[in-house]
Amino acid sequence: MSYIKIRNLNFSYKDDEGNPESVLRDLSLDIEKGEYVAVLGHNGSGKSTLAKLLNLVIEDYDYFEGSIEIDGMEISSPNMTEDDVYELRKKVGMVFQNPDNQIVATIVEEDVAFGPENLGLPREEIRARVDEALRIVGMTEYSRHEPHRLSGGQKQRIAIAGIIAMRPDCIIFDESTAMLDPMGRREVVNTMEKLNREDGKTIITITHYMDEAVRADRVIVIDDGRIILDGKPSEIFAKADKIRECGLDLPLCSDLLIKLRERGIRLDGEINTPEQCAETIARSLLK
Amino acid sequence: MSKIKVENVSFVYSAGTPFEVKALDDVTIEIKENTITGIIGHTGSGKSTLVQMFNGLVKPMSGRILLDGEDIWEKPKSIGSVRYRVGLVMQYPEYQLFEDTVIEDISFGPKNMGLDPDEIKKRVLEACELVGLDFDMLSKSPFDLSGGQKRRAAIAGVMAMRPEVLVLDEPAAGLDPAGRNSIFDGIKRYADATGAAVIIVSHSMDDMAKYCDELVVLSHSKVAMFGNRKEVFSRSRELEAIGLGVPQITRLVMLLRDKGIEISPDIYTVDEAETALAALFGGGV
């Protein structure tokens, strides 16, 4: 059974006059445990709403039709109690865009301990979880530092550690690299990849950066509240016209190789990352 | 021609306290007219402090900022007039929209300059055209626009003052690819139409490679590199070392060169790479 199972989901917000404004339309989706999924779509496509629903950060059942099941729990049910919501958030954690909005304590390790403390865990257990989480994000040496003195990428990794300490199965990153410099982006994306490959976490990342999306196993493109593409990165980015129609773009190196192919140059092979593109060009040029 | 000169500028936050932080340390650069200059640097490198000095929001603790050869702090009381000549678009400028309609918002700057209504109208329409904002939007409330449209309206508000220097701090942050392109194309149109000196702060090496003529690299409050695209991006290893990296296309070119393929290292954009590689493949047939 799928870890996340969404069936015929319709969701709308109410505009100023109280009329429903449709955001997600008849959306169905399955995500298995351990998948690494990137969700793409232009601003306003509905991708962030989808992510927030998976963690019930939006809890408005009035405008909600269809069902969302996570790890066998029907989270779209009106019978969800507050305890159920807490239970869900232990399974699915979320990292947001602005690192400064996610840090609550004045010492790094206290910030990471905030979640497990609220679970009422014994002291030793909290200690163990905090140490483990900081180790996974590579921030152990900063455990006694003040978060506001860290770089954006480091702060974001602290926010991730805070989620890891809750031991969720799945972590959703809602444009978590948008405000970071190149180094910070690299740190966060490497952490996502590590959490997936080494710890088996299910990763869902929402991003506008195509070069980040190609690193996932699966890419989903949402447009106008519907899933219009779903597949491996290489399958998705082969559909250049469709991608551009949705206000998105190809990763730059893929774009280059497609343009060369359009000129009639034969280039066989994968063209997602700069490394793959270099390999493909070299094979064709040097043969 | 040189429009702005930053001469030996330094700035320290919380000076004289245990929390003293050096933001800029003896920075000297020159910004030219008719040129798009990019400022890059990691978080905390001093970019935003520098950007706020161009229009006098932050005053250097030592050193001078020269606009057309004149020290902008020569007569501190007239610093207000510098802000009409040097327009600053801050990060997430859409949060600063406040009027009832888009047209009033874009008119706010020119109105404060004391221009007559016809001139204001002319400039507002011109600015909308440059950023690609439909005239239908003008009568709407700014809050009825999409994120990308709001951003463009906010930028148009600064362009409508027709500044001789246009400074933009992360103008495309948080936008989708189509939104990014439309913002940068608008900035480019402004630069071409007015011959202004344009300064862009961005974290995207790819956008910088595509749109900027000159680049300033800040690292730990100092100027680490300053020169044209080629001069800066040819120092890729140093850029990597300060945590910035190179454009994706440049990275691909470096990988190809490592494999023994003879391609010029001075390639930064998709178009440039397409031309060079097509030639290597024998004209693309």
Image (spheres, rainbow, N blue to C red):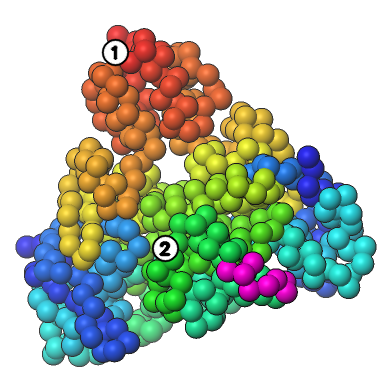
Q: Chain of mark 1?
A: B
* Residue B114 part of the magenta-drawn span: yes
**Left/right of residue B154 with respect to residue B21 in the rendered view:** left
User: Where is residue A234 shown, x and y percent of the image?
Assistant: 23, 38
Tell me the amino acid under the disc marked 1.
Val
Total number of numbered discs in the rendering: 2
Q: Residue at x 32, y 87 (%)?
A: A16
Separation (CA) of disc 2 from disc 1: 42 Å
Above or below, B166 relative to B239: below
- Which callout, 2 or 1, points to the residue nearer the camera? 2
Q: Residue at x 48, y 79 (%)?
A: B101
**Callout 2 secondary element:** loop
Q: Which residues are magenta?
A: B113-121
- Which label is found at residue B285? 1
Question: Residue tagged by mark 2?
Answer: B134
Q: Position of residue B17 (x, y in %)?
A: 83, 73
